[in-house]
Amino acid sequence: MSSKVGLILSLLFVSLFVAFGIDMINVQFAYSSLDSKCVAISYRISKHGSVDEALVNALEEEYQVEFVCTGNCQPLFGDVVTYQVSTYIDALVISKSAVKITIERTAIIGYYA
């Protein structure tokens, strides 16, 4: 009888561990997706030459992210622009509410990689 109770309790822990692993995979997938979007966003900022309201709105609409310029938002040619890109994911075990994932990147104005 005690071995059956032990098996039931261990299955509970295993199921929580599997749910936590699924959350970690979802976080990594969202981070990778956000990182690839940052490469495209850096290219668009470099090509556009500035970070104005029209560009921010276009980036947020096209890539479905939140864009925040954190440094040197009125750059000249060759200047470095620092920005943050955020998205939200729904987690199973990590949090009851949506988890915000934020990446901070830079772009050089006039440099097309």
Image: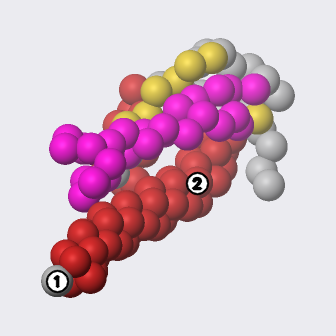
Relative to residue 36, is residue 88 depicted above or below? above
Crowding at mark 2 (Cα within 10 Å: few <14, some 14-19, many 20+): some
Q: Which residue is labeled 1 in the image?
A: 1
- Location of the N terminus by quadrant is bottom left
Q: Which SS does the magenta portion mostly show?
A: strand
Crowding at mark 1 (Cα within 10 Å: few <14, some 14-19, many 20+): few
Q: Which residue is labeled 2 in the image?
A: 35
- 43 or 91, which lies in front? 91
Residue drawn at x 67%, y 26% as measured from the top left:
81
Determine the secondary structure under disc 1. loop
- Amino acid of disc 1: Met
| Numbered tag placed on residue 97 in the rendering | none
Visible residue check, residue 32: yes
Tag count: 2
Q: Which residues are magenta?
A: 80-107
Relative to residue 62, is residue 71 depicted above or below? above
Residue drawn at x 80%, y 55% as measured from the top left:
113
Quadrant in the picture for residue 51: top right
Q: Comparing marks 2 and 1, which lies closer to the viewer?
A: 1
- Amino acid of disc 2: Asp
